[in-house]
Amino acid sequence: MKPSIYVTRALPEETIAALRARFDVEVNPDDQVLSRAELMEKVRGRAAIVTLLTDTIDAAVLDAAGPQCRVVANYAVGYNNFDVAAATARGVVLVNTPGVLDNATATHTMALLLAAARRIPESDRYVRAGKWRGWAPMFFIGQDVDGQVLGIAGAGRIGRNVARKARGFDMRILYTDAVRNEAFEQETGARMVDKATLLAESDFLSLHVPLTAETRHYIDAAALRQMKPTAVLVNASRGPVVDEAALVEALRAGTIAAAGLDVYEHEPELAPGLAELDNVVVVPHIASATRQTRLAMGEIVVRNVIQVLTGQTPDCCVNPDVLKPGA
């Protein structure tokens, strides 16, 4: 009998087909997040579960799955939906899809930055509404990008990729990170600064920090007040790193000029008032949404699930302690 796998959301058919070639696969037929009760019911008896960031995988869900469950694979690079300690204690391997979406996310970040700077969605809505009556010298005045200061909070793979792309616009790069990266500095001319300097000097601030207890509300009301009134904030990392209610007030009051958001504090809900503001670009968590990237993510998921269920060491384990002898 083939091992049984449950997939919590529809994925590219190529990914599902690759799993079905080796396993007994059931896929959530509805393109929506499972309720907790549905998730706990559907994972029972499975050898593996393929999940999304919207699926909370904690001790209760793992216990509902049963002791035969050996691997949970996130179709995502993030894994803040995993209770890593609970999985490790139960001998369940957790895997994700790192690296493969770096370029797509960095490109998307630049798209948000440019769209917010040049007021693209706002002017698009204006034309579609039939309001345009011809060229005017003061219409939709935006901001230059070329030669401006780009601040990067979190110079990991994606943050560094954004900096490389920004160099095409001759942007000057500042960054904060836990560790200095001299190779990155030499490649892009980036300068490492503290958070206060990053906030005060950035014309554009792009967030690429992981979501931890320390980075939750990394950008709060106080941080927003330290930014330039002409600054643009871009977030394609994790929603809760920004205090969304404080951002709404800052955008409304002109504390900062604009924002471009791919992620939100309480997805899919937006903070009250956010959608009504013209000086924010809001898109539905699509940073990795290219066909090539989504297929590559699926390939990583399939490979890692096969590796675990055939007794091999997975390429992308996020709880390596579970692989130690005697664990």
Image (cartoon, rainbow, N blue to C red):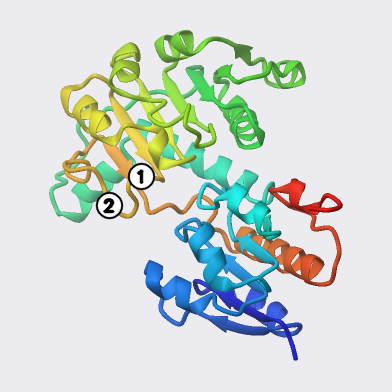
In this rendering, position of residue 229 left or right of residue 64: left
- The disc at residue 269 is 2
- The disc at residue 264 is 1
In this rendering, position of residue 277 left or right of residue 305: left
| Between 100 and 78, the one nearer to me in the picture | 78
Q: Is the C-beta separation of discs 2 and 1 under 8 Å?
A: yes
In this rendering, position of residue 268 left or right of residue 50: left
Residue occupying image coordinates x 25% and y 34%: 279
Query: Is 259 located above or below residue 187 in the figure?
Result: below
Residue occupying image coordinates x 83% and y 49%: 324
For badge 2, the amino acid type reads Glu
Q: Secondary structure at mark 1?
A: loop
In this rendering, position of residue 34 left or right of residue 84: left
Crowding at label 1, few (<14), some or many (≥20) Cα neighbours within 10 Å?
many
Q: Tell me the quarter of the picture where residue 23 sits.
A: bottom right
Distance, label 2 to label 1, CA atoms, is 8 Å
**What count of labels does the image hold?**
2
